[in-house]
Image (cartoon, coloured by chain):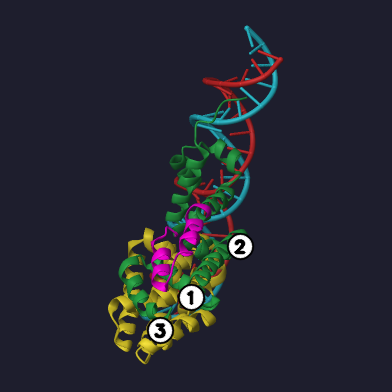
Chain colours: A green, B yellow, C cyan, D red
Amino acid sequence: MGRPRAFDEDEAVRAAVALFGGRAYDGVSVDDLVSHLGVHRNSLYKTFGSKRGLYLIALRRHLADDVRPLLDALAGASDAAAALRLVTSADLDLLLLAAIERAPVDEEVAAEVTAALAAVDQAIADALGVSADLAAALTAAALGIILRGNPDNAATALAQCLDPLT
Amino acid sequence: MGRPRAFDEDEAVRAAVALFGGRAYDGVSVDDLVSHLGVHRNSLYKTFGSKRGLYLIALRRHLADDVRPLLDALAGASDAAAALRLVTSADLDLLLLAAIERAPVDEEVAAEVTAALAAVDQAIADALGVSADLAAALTAAALGIILRGNPDNAATALAQCLDPLT
DNA sequence: ATCAGTCAAGAACGATCGTTCCTCAATCGT
DNA sequence: ACGATTGAGGAACGATCGTTCTTGACTGAT
């Protein structure tokens, strides 16, 4: 019953992932969301509760859509180079931004981020048979390379150093 | 002539570095700055021009106070482990935050960040005699480790893998 | 056909944002 | 001592923030 909604909720959340992944949380206004998501103000609050609610939903969606496939792919990585290449070529913008600017001020975000990064660590440790510390370091290194925006040369250079050891 | 200022400009800038290094740019309000810097609104605008002006000054101060000493220390690094330890133990919070959340939307910030990271790369390349790509990767790895907040175990684990190669 | 229920559309809310203005206090050179 | 100049203090600005309210259009079930 009632009037059918004129927007695709999945599509809206995906657009929110793109928006929140491109700018800081406070840099994305509700007006931005309304105009880019194809969802009107009222429906946005009815559907997602609040801006923060939508952010959390977008973050979880990002983890499900982008991090989970990465975990599966990492299971097939045979050396550090492959693992590094997989992580650095994944789209982790929102996770990175969440880790550095939202996690410190939002403990629910912090919990999601910590769990996601721990899952990546575990996947690397399992696939390569390395220590948890080294796996965490590899994850961190990959994040740093993503942060710098140059996934190709830096990742391969580091991988060449790590290859013979694993 | 005129009334002498009741605040220490250097001290105020240093407090601004701490504030901007701890939260996102939009998360630090002018009220926050006024109450933490010991500078009143009027003097803040008179002295620093604007919030963004103060941010740029704080960023440059951070580079001079924290990155420059790091560059000097890196000149004495003899292996990758030492370089990693130096970078990960440096206080680079503001640089990290600037790189990920301000550089994309403020080209002046982007220029400072790019130059600072390039300087770190160069210092590592010079000290270790490694390629520019590997130096950039080491810088990125260190930033990623800082980002994850666990400088000790991860950095040493990664360093142990890189040590015999340099 | 009618009523209940949902959504679209946009005006409007109070709060807070960065910034400016105005007034008074304090110190300088003369 | 006195006018000039600068900072302190705080009110106030318009703009924008996230959020809510009001109104009307549309659809499904009775």
- The image position of residue B80, as x and y in percent, is 39, 86
Above or below — where is B63 with respect to A71? below
Quarter the C terminus of chain A occupies: bottom left
Residue A114 visible: yes
Q: Nearer the viewer, residue A53 or A165?
A: A165
Q: Amino acid at mark 1?
A: Ala
Report the residue marked by disc 3: B162
Q: Residue at x 44, y 59 (%)?
A: A93
Report the residue marked by disc 1: A137
Q: Report crowding for label 2: few under 14, some 14 to 19, many 20 or more residues within 10 A (C-alpha).
A: few
* Disc 3 chain ID: B
Determine if the magenta segment contains residue B22.
no
- Determine whether the residue tagged by mark 1 lies in a helix, strand or loop: helix
Residues marked 1 and 3, same chain? no
* Disc 2 chain ID: A
- Determine whether the residue tagged by mark 3 lies in a helix, strand or loop: helix
- The image position of residue A130, as x and y in percent, is 51, 77
Quarter the N terminus of chain A occupies: top right
Q: Are marks 1 and 3 in contact (CB under 8 Å)?
A: no
Above or below — where is B159 with respect to D26? below
Q: Residue at x 61, y 44 (%)?
A: A49
Total number of numbered discs in the rendering: 3
Q: Earlier in the sequence, mark 2 or mark 1?
A: 2
Residues marked 2 and 1, same chain? yes
Q: CA distance from mark 1 to mark 3?
A: 12 Å
Query: Which residues are drawn in magenta?
Result: A64-92
Report the residue marked by disc 2: A111
